[in-house]
């Protein structure tokens, strides 16, 4: 169940917001555009870009740049970046501008998911057409497996954009089961009717109390030919990963568990193991 990897030439693209669409009370779609988006590619369902935001003090977006020797990072300015999923890219082939959609969870901003705020969610809450960002990457794409009879997708709000991409990029022959672990039923508005036809979805609401995610995963029947992808809050995924990887013994070729953020941690390094006691 191999997932092919594709490398992309690194690029930092300066773009401007062209539209802002409220998708649910807690999620907003920011569409960016600009000539720099020419050649943008992200063919994998869980690909990510680094989004560089303006310094709230100065309004200036500082980002690395490419030089003959590689990537140069300015040391005399504040660099604020976070990871996001390139939800949809339109190349603008018929004379239109290329456009990229990024879907942001609004956490700690009053209207959406509770908890602390951060520069990315605060920016998205107030973003308006004309605002500037820089998009770095993606450095590479990891394609969806072509030969999985079944896929099990587990996601919280931050991973709903990637979940949507999984639904688009898996072969039609792959049957999809999903567990979506969200704050409350407002989040259901993110998922379209077409997506509901494509996947059998179990919704969990965090407002109903803790422990539901692990219980729901333990109740799944997981056949040998299933590929499993889980992404969301890192600590919540530790027991899920332990169960899948160690109790069931599912090997890494069939399983990816990715921490997209961690409660109380700013700008989580998602390359670090989600379970420090088990870096495998
Ligand atoms: C590969 C990858 C793809 C991702 N794709 C998306 C995406 O498409 N859309 C998206 O919204 N996010 C996505 N994320 C998650 C996003 O990068 C983090 O949520 C990030 O921390 C947001 O930055 P911030 O500046 O808002 O908060 P930070 O400054 O990083 O954190 C500030 C505080 O907010 C808390 N926090 C961070 N995120 C949340 C949250 N979702 N809910 C509640 N509290 C939170 C932190 O624990 C911390 O206490 C992705 C992450 C990865 C690794």
Image: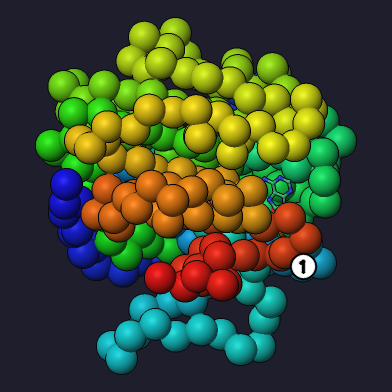
Report if residue 43 is visible in the image.
no
Could you tell me which residue is drawn at 18 percent across and 59 percent down?
6
For this view, does 36 lie left or right of residue 193?
left
Q: Where 148 falls versus 48 (above or below)?
A: above
- In which image quadrant can residue 45 be found? top left
Could you tell me which residue is drawn at 51 percent across and 84 percent down?
73
| Residue 259 or residue 251, whichever sits in front | 251
Residue 11 lies, in percent from the top left, at: 34, 66
* Other residues around mark 1 within 10 Å, as few (<14) / some (14–19) / many (≥20): few
- In which image quadrant can residue 252 be found? bottom left
Q: Where 231 falls versus 24 (above or below)?
A: below
Which residue is situated farthest in the left direction here?
147
Residue designated by label 1: 58
Q: Where 258 falls versus 86 (above or below)?
A: below
- In which image quadrant can residue 190 be found? top right
For this view, does 222 lie left or right of residue 17?
left
| Residue 109 or residue 10, whichever sits in front | 109
Residue 74 lies, in percent from the top left, at: 56, 85
Could you tell me which residue is drawn at 75 percent across and 37 percent down?
210
Q: Secondary structure at mark 1?
A: loop
| Residue 160 or residue 20, whichever sits in front | 160
Residue 159 lies, in percent from the top left, at: 51, 40
Residue 39 lies, in percent from the top left, at: 24, 52
Query: Ligand 1 within 8 A of label 1's CB?
Result: no
In this picture the colour scheme is rainbow
Report if residue 228 is visible in the image.
yes
Could you tell me which residue is drawn at 23 percent across and 42 percent down?
144
How many numbered badges does the structure rendering display?
1
């Amino acid at each position: 169940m191999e997932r092919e990897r594709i490398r992309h030439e690194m690029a930092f693209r300066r773009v401007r917001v062209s539209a802002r669409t409220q998708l649910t009370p807690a999620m907003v779609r920011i569409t960016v555009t600009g000539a720099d988006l020419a050649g943008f590619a992200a063919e994998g369902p869980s690909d990510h870009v680094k989004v560089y935001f303006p310094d709230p003090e100065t309004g200036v977006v500082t980002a690395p740049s490419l030089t003959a020797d590689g990537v140069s990072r300015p040391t005399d300015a504040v660099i604020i970046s976070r990871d996001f999923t390139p939800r949809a890219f339109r190349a603008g082939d018929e004379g239109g501008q290329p456009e990229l959609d990024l879907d942001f969870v609004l956490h700690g901003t009053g209207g959406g998911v509770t908890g602390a705020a951060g520069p990315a969610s605060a920016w998205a809450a107030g973003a308006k057409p004309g605002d500037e960002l820089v998009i770095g990457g993606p450095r590479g794409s990891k394609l969806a497996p072509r030969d999985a009879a079944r896929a099990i997708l587990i996601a919280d709000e931050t991973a709903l954009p990637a979940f949507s991409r999984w639904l688009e990029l898996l072969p039609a022959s792959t049957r999809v089961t999903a567990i979506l672990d969200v704050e409350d039923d407002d989040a259901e508005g993110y998922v379209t009717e077409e997506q509901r036809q494509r996947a059998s979805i179990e919704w969990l609401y965090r407002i109903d109390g803790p422990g539901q995610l692990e219980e729901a995963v333990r109740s799944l029947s997981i056949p040998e030919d299933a590929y499993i992808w889980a992404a969301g809050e890192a600590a919540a995924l530790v027991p899920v990963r332990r169960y899948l990887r160690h109790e069931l013994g599912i090997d890494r070729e069939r399983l990816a568990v990715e921490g997209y953020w961690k409660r109380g941690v700013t700008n989580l390094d998602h390359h670090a193991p989600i379970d420090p006691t088990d870096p495998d």
